[in-house]
Image (cartoon, rainbow, N blue to C red):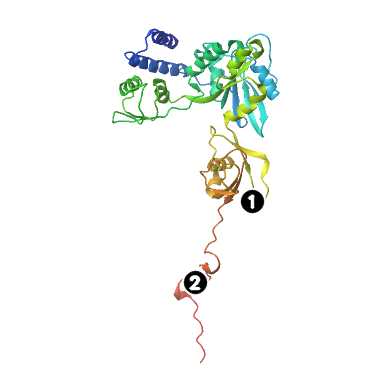
Amino acid sequence: MGILERIKEIEAEMARTQKNKATEYHLGQLKAKLAKLRTQLLEPPKGSSGGGDGFEVTKFGHGRVALIGFPSVGKSTLLTMLTGTHSEAASYEFTTLTCIPGIIHYNDTKIQLLDLPGIIEGASEGKGRGRQVIAVAKSSDLVLMVLDASKSEGHRQILTRELEAVGLRLNKRPPQIYFKRKKTGGISFNTTVPLTHIDEKLCYQILHEYKIHNAEVLFREDATVDDLIDVIEGNRKYIKCVYVYNKIDVVGIDDVDRLARQPNSLLNLDRLLARMWEEMGLVRVYTKPQGQQPDFSDPVVLSTDRGGCTVEDFCNHIHRSLLKDVKYVLVWGTSARHYPQHCGLSHGLQDEDVVQIVKKKEKEEGGRGRFKSHTNAPDRISDRVKKAPLKT
């Protein structure tokens, strides 16, 4: 029996199993088996050289945004409107057969926008080159899910299910679970909050399903079985997603109002770029040389997902060797309490801050002034020139 058949068999068993207190341990084991099989499905076949027929493009700019959606929902048209890059659009499905990149120039930054081929139901199993499309989406900083307003609910659920099947978690944060494998000592289970979805016995069963018999597990929140499996797998990507609705002119005003009130939804093209900027969390930092005016033409762009937004990250972004020469920095902007503020390496920077780096001065050998320690006289007393005796 192949992996796909085993996955379908486990999904069918989970569908016909009633959810109650008596079956929660059995369902937990089935979820762990399902996650293991899906991970095996994503691995390359044994004996392959590793090179595939994917369409990954080189990363460019300060951020990457991927357009995900069903065929013929308007992804190519949206790419052309935002970037000016021509992407063929036609009245038939699967017009776009490869990844087409474009560049958005917004707020002195460059954002790479990727037009991906439409994916269909079963993409996580490899249908319609779905694995290649989702692999590119995994390397993005933000996902724009383009939906047809007349079919939004069904398409949104299918796309979310397909993305979650391959390890993408949309608009979620990593669970507060500490997990560490050990060589000996058995399983140590601890929690700092009351748990309502999982207990110690179920945790042991899931770990044994992964053949883990020595580990340390600490729950810092009321997590679920799925959260524990995600932490054990360790290959999940937590990414932000904005649902962009197209063709809203074919639905009524009540449906438009309902879609507009849903979280992370967007219907207005004029607001799209600003919303992308907010979700990606890009921070522009301007440099100021000593004794000169700030340079507002070329900012240093930082983000939490790409390294961090502290002064230390700013210095590493300029050059790796700069960090050891920094004495302190002067910061102007919203992150400073007063202008300028002397800050250390752990200070968090905010958008449009101005930073001046003050380097350590090279120490002069022997001190300065009257504290100068080195002389031209010899070190040993025997080598010193004796003064002439005084005349009497």
**Vertical position of residue 61 compared to residue 98: above or below:** below
The structure residue drawn at horizontal position 31% and vertical position 24%, both measured from the top left corner, is: 200
Mark 1 is on which residue type? Gln
Of all residues shown, which one is farthest toward the bottom? 392
Q: Considering the numbered disc 2 on the image, is that residue within a helix, a strand or a loop?
A: loop
- At x 54%, y 58%, the residue is 363
Q: Position of residue 202 (x, y in %)?
A: 33, 20
Q: In the image, is 9 to the left or to the right of 310?
A: left
Viewer-nearest residue: 354 or 46: 354
Q: From this viewpoint, which residue is outermost toward the front?
A: 254
Question: In x, y percent, where is residue 248?
Answer: 64, 14
Query: Could you say which disc has been placed on residue 290 in the image?
Result: 1
Picture coordinates of residue 392 (x, y %)? 51, 92
* Proximity of marks 2 and 1: CB atoms separated by less than 8 Å: no
Question: Quick check: 173 left or right of 183?
Answer: right
SS state under label 1? loop
Q: Nearer the viewer, residue 105 or 94?
A: 105
Residue drawn 60% across the image and 49% down it? 340
Q: Is residue 117 visible?
A: no
**Given the image, on which type of amino acid does mark 2 rest?**
Pro
Image quarter of the N terminus: top left
Disc count in the image?
A: 2
Q: Which mark is first along the chain, 1 or 2?
A: 1
Q: Residue at x 51, y 72 (%)?
A: 377
Which of the 4 quarters of the picture holds residue 272? top right
Residue 354, compared with residue 201, is above or below; it is below
* 171 relative to 9 in the view: left or right: right
Give left or right: position of 230 versus 112: left
Circle 2 Cα neighbour tier, 10 Å, few/some/many (<14 / 14–19 / ≥20): few
The image quarter containing residue 55 is top right
Q: CA distance from mark 2 to mark 1?
A: 42 Å
Query: Which residue position is annotated with label 2?
Result: 378
